[in-house]
Amino acid sequence: GGVTAIGGGGDELWGGSSQRGVFLLKPQAGDAGLIEHLTFENTAGGLRSNTISAVFRDREGIVWFGTDRGVCRYDRESFRATTVSANRQSNYVRSLLQTRGGEVWSGTNRGLFKLTESGGSAAALEVTELQTRSVYDLFEDGAESVWAATSSGLFVKRKVSESEQTALLFFEQGCYFNQFFFKDGLQYSTVLL
């Protein structure tokens, strides 16, 4: 299968594939040596699937994988998987983003989710405004707004103050999105990054 995602940092390069799991490579003078190959089978299902569409390494060195069966975190000792939603298409993760503030966002075939942890257990809060849309890619700008490229346009979640965010979290699950259309000067209604 093809290489569908790359990520890492320092002297690590993680490559996700469409059918063969994840490969950890050590780049060396324009070449790379294989360090580790993780699959659904050799991790006893810790890696939820061999279909990987997103990879990133967070500030603590934990590697996150977006798969067609949810999100997996790997800390070199064990895996921790998160089911994003009961809807199968919402678990097909296309993109992952960690913001400068430490929030982790998951773009899926059926919506956008903010991943949270409380008391050692993970949960995913769905952004209702993007519920039925495929989210292809995510980006954080200099103002700490999160942008989402979707099947029906470009959306932005603006960063708000802590007091406003608390109210928005209660009423709108932490998100305020604006939608951009042709009238706003965009050439296409769908933005693929």
Image (cartoon, rainbow, N blue to C red):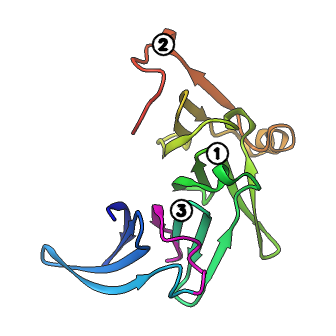
- Categorize mark 3 by other alpha carbons within 10 Å: few (<14), some (14-19), many (20+): many
Where is mark 1, residue-wise?
112
Which quarter of the figure has residue 10?
bottom left
In the image, 19 versus 118, the foreground residue is 19
Tell me whether circle 3 and circle 1 mark residues in contact (CB < 8 Å): no
Q: Which mark identifies residue 182?
A: 2
Of the image marks 2 and 1, the number of the one nearer the N terminus:
1
Query: Which residue does the image show at 74% across and 46% down from the upper left?
Result: 126
Residue 46 sits inside the magenta stretch: yes
> Magenta region: which residues?
44-63
The disc placed on residue 66 is: 3
Is 54 colored magenta in this rendering? yes
Nearer-the-camera pick, 44 or 84: 44
Please say if 67 is above or below 161.
below
Instruction: Sort mark 1 into few (<14), some (14-19) or many (20+) by Cα contacts within 10 Å.
Output: many
Location of the C terminus by quadrant is top left
**Is residue 178 left or right of 95 when viewed as pictured?**
right
Quarter occupied by residue 21 = bottom left
Which of pointers 3 and 2 indicates the residue nearer the eye?
3
For the N terminus, the quadrant is bottom left
- Report if residue 123 is visible in the image: yes
Cα–Cα gap, marks 3 and 1: 13 Å
